[in-house]
């Protein structure tokens, strides 16, 4: 029986077609893999501008282990993960556990950890994380700049929406550098305040992008008066709002995060909607629940999940895509399209306009030990997605889209 394949060139063109109409509702979800694709000089050559969640976790662990003030309490905390799940907790798992303990410890202590020790660990982890992710975006052209240019360059009937679970300020820096107006749920300048009414009833023009930070941000703070504000720097009594262990909080503390998720739910829930994810591994169950519910309830919505590397690293996501025909997962070595998983077709199309931008032919090792040329899909790397968006802007020929659709 002849083996069937998906065509990476065709899928690149279909994605381009989905992003082209000016009346289409379009959103991007930028995951933790996006800042990793931005490389900066290092003594060994280059390094990621911001580490992924595993890299950030190692930085946090190393600093706390070496801290005279926190090492004992951190060791006691990490002891609680031994023999349990997850086996290798990330920064977010650790924060979730600390905050859960804060909710139950009250005036007592658990494994020697009282409320003061837990709050100090929480604040120190947030401080380390802020230092690592609160970095300036390079002035050279990055994928963030290319996305900002693309948002600014195409006049649309509906605003472009950008969702991100990242705490960094990279997308804000890019939008501001290229003078792209945006609304993020906060109103004001010196101490911008979160305003739910404006989010629900906003009537800004479509040229204003919408930015929704579903896991908070390094410049979000809950004040001693229990207000949520956006500003630089901590004041006395502030609690930094990164990573929403929101299911542990009361309704008032959950609101900023839930309001952001509601925007994603609303985006997918009506009309023709295209969600493009990049740098997102589909490992966040809260986000997955919203995305998959939206795709199930609205057959006119579609999600293009652009995955970095081979699809073998995304077992859970592949399982979900096989059950959701409007969830398309495109990895380096193959895709799940319309619930059908296949390798990419190996034939190179060197004259295709998306060759080298979206698709490249590489030598891949076979089980026999030999190597053969196979097509690799590259848009799971944010760097290439930025080039893809820039290329879309550079083409003004209306026939470009249709000429290469087959």
Image: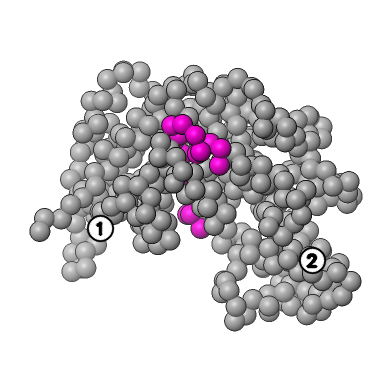
Who is closer to the viewer here, 176 or 82? 82
**Tag count:** 2
Picture residue at 47% right of the left edge, 54% below the top? 281
Report the quarter where the C terminus lies: top left
Quadrant of the drawing holding the N terminus: bottom left
Q: Position of residue 74 (x, y in %)?
A: 74, 72
Q: Position of residue 104 (x, y in %)?
A: 79, 69
> Of label 1 and label 2, which has the lower sequence position?
2
Front one among 26 and 125 = 26
Residue receiving disc 2? 102
Could you say whether the residue bearing mark 1 is in a helix, strand or loop? strand
Q: Examine the structure image and report whether residue 216 is included in the region drawn in magenta.
A: no
In this rendering, the label closer to the viewer, 1 or 2: 2
Q: Nearer the viewer, residue 137 or 187?
A: 187
Q: Quadrant of residue 322?
A: bottom left
Any part of residue 251 in sight:
yes
- Is residue 382 visible to us here? no
Q: CA distance from mark 1 to mark 2?
A: 50 Å
Tell me which corner region of the image, top left, top right, bottom left or bottom right, holds residue 394.
top left
Question: Does the CB distance between marks 1 and 2 fall below 8 Å?
Answer: no
Q: Is residue 345 above or below residue 17?
A: below
Q: To which residue does mark 1 refer?
A: 364
Magenta segment: 265-283
Indicate the secondary structure of the residue bearing disc 2. helix
Between 85 and 66, the one lying in front of the other is 85
Name the residue located 71 percent from the left edge and 30 percent from the top edge: 198
């Amino acid at each position: 029986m002849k083996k069937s394949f998906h065509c990476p060139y065709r899928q690149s063109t279909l994605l381009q077609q989905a992003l082209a109409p000016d009346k289409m509702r379009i959103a991007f979800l930028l995951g933790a893999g996006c800042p990793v694709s931005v490389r900066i000089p290092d003594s060994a050559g280059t390094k990621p501008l911001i580490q992924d969640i595993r890299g950030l976790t190692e930085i946090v662990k190393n600093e706390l282990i070496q801290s005279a003030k926190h090492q004992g309490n951190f060791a006691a905390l990490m002891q609680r993960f031994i023999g349990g799940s997850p086996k290798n907790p990330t920064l977010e798992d650790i924060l979730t556990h600390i905050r859960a303990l804060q909710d139950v410890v009250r005036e007592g202590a658990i494994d020697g950890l009282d409320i003061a020790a837990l709050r100090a660990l929480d604040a120190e982890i947030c401080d380390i994380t802020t230092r690592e992710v609160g970095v300036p975006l390079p002035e050279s052209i990055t994928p963030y700049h290319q996305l900002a240019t693309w948002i600014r360059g195409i006049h649309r009937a509906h605003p472009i929406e950008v969702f991100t679970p990242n705490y960094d300020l990279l997308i804000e820096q890019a939008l501001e550098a290229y003078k792209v107006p945006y609304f993020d749920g906060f109103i004001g300048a010196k101490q911008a305040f979160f305003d739910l009414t404006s989010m629900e009833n906003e009537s800004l023009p479509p040229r204003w992008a919408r930015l929704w930070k579903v896991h908070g941000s390094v410049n979000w703070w809950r004040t001693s008066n229990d207000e949520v504000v956006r500003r630089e720097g901590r004041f006395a009594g502030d609690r930094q709002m990164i990573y929403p262990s929101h299911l542990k909080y009361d309704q008032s503390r959950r609101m900023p995060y839930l309001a952001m998720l509601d925007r994603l739910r609303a985006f997918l829930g009506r009309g023709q909607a295209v969600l493009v994810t990049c740098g997102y591994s589909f490992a966040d169950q809260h986000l997955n629940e919203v995305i998959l519910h939206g795709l199930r309830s609205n057959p006119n919505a579609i999600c293009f999940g652009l995955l970095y590397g081979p699809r073998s690293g995304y077992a859970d996501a592949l399982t979900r895509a096989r059950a959701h025909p409007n969830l398309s997962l495109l990895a380096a070595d193959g895709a799940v399209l319309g619930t059908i998983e296949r390798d990419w077709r190996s034939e190179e199309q060197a004259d295709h306009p998306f060759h080298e931008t979206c698709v490249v032919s590489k030598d891949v090792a076979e089980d026999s030990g030999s190597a053969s040329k196979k097509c690799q899909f590259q848009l799971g790397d944010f760097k290439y997605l930025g080039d893809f968006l820039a290329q879309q802007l550079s083409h003004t020929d209306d026939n470009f889209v249709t000429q290469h659709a087959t």
